[in-house]
Amino acid sequence: VHMNGDFQYDIVMEMTFDGLERELHEFGLQGRRICIVTDSNVAALYLNEVEAVVSRCCRETSHFIFPAGEENKNLDTVRSLYEVLIKRQFDRYDVLLALGGGVVGDLCGFAAATYLRGISFIQVPTTLLSQVDSSIGGKTGVDFDAYKNMVGAFHMPKLVYTNISALKTLSPEQFSSGMGEVIKHGLIRDASYYHWLKDHASMIHARDLEHLKEMVKISNHIKREVVEKDPTEQGDRALLNLGHTLGHAIEKLADFRLLHGHCVGLGCIAAMAISIHRGLVQEEELTRLYELMRDFDMPVTVSGLSSHDIVSLTKNDKKMDSGAIRFILLEQIGKAYVDKTVTEAEMSKGLIPILA
Ligand code: NAD
Ligand code: ZN
């Protein structure tokens, strides 16, 4: 899938890393130096292969590996990366390549946005979550102390190169988590996609590459469309936050027992429940959503949390958004909207189905 226009970068999807060579040529990145930024897990799986492909067309290839895990998506790691870049005398024409999941993409993108006031970077996403969601749209950043994504920048990659077959090595939990964002895409934008997911659940679950390719393609299209209209999140981009207001609160309280996409899934259930209470969506849709999530081994309840604590935490979102939470509700399956009138009582009621 090649795309241009305002968005200014291409999304390329293949079943191997080999095509990177051609793409780098196409972008005139060939005489440049490239530093591949990756984490310890992905380095063990794919660094040699990617480095070999990249070194065929770049002046000089190097790498920076940091220990895998969200706890390393911070300014200390960025600092070590800056040190390496300075030591290697990276200049404005050189390029960073993010090889890995959302943690690598966010951190590498942020370093690229800030080093020498911004150098080019390329996303090579390897998790489902990063392939369908985080590599698209130009949001980069790192965590600061306990605050997720507190420091960041909008910085568009020059290229997103997705190798679908890298999903084969992803753990079942990580794959299942990525499905949370996929289901979200269907819910906010595309009812037929949502139903397609249900109809092809077993092939997707088995990670049949053709099905994964189709799925990543449609999800990319949805994310791209929403972001393209609103790159800096003044309006419609907020729709991508379906399930995230309550999901983030759950993620914090569950203290990393649950993965991000799983929390988003739980948040989607709650948002749908609120939409049902408002008479927007039919009651039986909730059962369908449960079934779909179960098809992908996603949790549909969480234990040990109180709705009071979850709702209290959403007040952080509120502060950050000058007073009113921009809650995302469903007008119908495949159509989401921003609602600033959702009350705490409604949120508590919406949480009932997921609190075990
Ligand atoms: P991640 O990057 O931590 O990857 C999950 C795990 O899978 C890691 O241990 C990683 O080493 C491993 N892994 C990666 N690719 C693999 C592969 N092909 N095979 C086997 N193992 C592999 O997590 P994630 O879920 O990809 O991303 C989560 C991050 O993304 C969060 O920090 C979140 O804030 C961020 N995010 C950013 C955006 C955005 O728009 N920028 C959107 C959503 C999420
Ligand atoms: Zn998310």
Image (cartoon, rainbow, N blue to C red):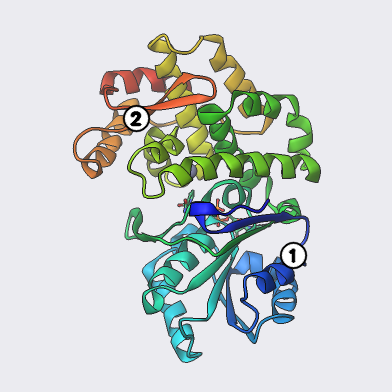
Q: Nearer the viewer, residue 149 or 54?
A: 54
Q: How many marks?
A: 2
Horizontal arrangement in the rendering, residue 178 relative to residue 244 (left or right):
right
Q: Which mark is residue 17?
A: 1
For image coordinates 39% across by 38% down, the residue present is 238
The x, y position of residue 182, in whole percent, is 59, 37
Q: Which residue is mark 2?
A: 327
> Quick check: 202 above or below 47?
above
Looking at numbered disc 2 in the image, what kind of residue is underneath it?
Phe
Horizontal arrangement in the rendering, residue 340 relative to residue 245 (left or right):
left
How crowded pointer 2 is (Cα within 10 Å; few <14, some 14-19, many 20+) is rated as many
The x, y position of residue 152, in whole percent, is 36, 60
For image coordinates 74% across by 78% down, the residue present is 52
The secondary structure type at the circle numbered 1 is loop
**Cβ of mark 2 under 8 A from ligand 2:** no
Q: Residue 16, located in which quarter of the rendered image?
A: bottom right
